[in-house]
Image: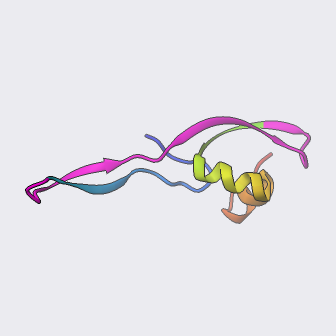
Amino acid sequence: MARSEITGRRRLRARHVSHSNIKTPRWQNVNVQKRRLWVPELNKFVTLKVTTRDLRTIDKMGVLAYARRHGMRLS
């Protein structure tokens, strides 16, 4: 299943609404990417499955700070 390893974000239940206003259930998947990220504090690369939204925040904060905020340890 598509799931972020840091935040735990996963697919959401949604509804497709047709032109005649009939609502049928469907899934909204998150955009999960497998990325190799450099962690300067540990002086090494870490491979994680993260969402694109996570990647944007990681660019601003850094991997270690973002992982700590969500209760994940990187070693």
Residue at image position (67%, 36%) is 35
Q: How far from the left and from the top, in percent, is residue 70? A: 66, 62
Q: Quadrant of residue 20?
A: bottom left
Which region of the structure is painted magenta?
Answer: 19-45
Q: How far from the left and from the top, in percent, is residue 40? A: 90, 45
Seen in the image, is 49 located left or right of residue 1? right
Q: How far from the left and from the top, in percent, is residue 72? A: 69, 56
Seen in the image, is 65 located left or right of residue 14? right
Q: How far from the left and from the top, in percent, is residue 1? A: 43, 40
> In this picture, is 37 found above or below 15?
above
In reply to whether residue 37 is colored magenta, the answer given is yes
In reply to whether residue 11 is colored magenta, the answer given is no
**Front-most of residues 39 and 73:** 39
Residue at image position (91%, 49%) is 41
Residue at image position (13%, 54%) is 19
Residue at image position (81%, 36%) is 45
The quarter of the rendered structure image containing the C terminus is top right
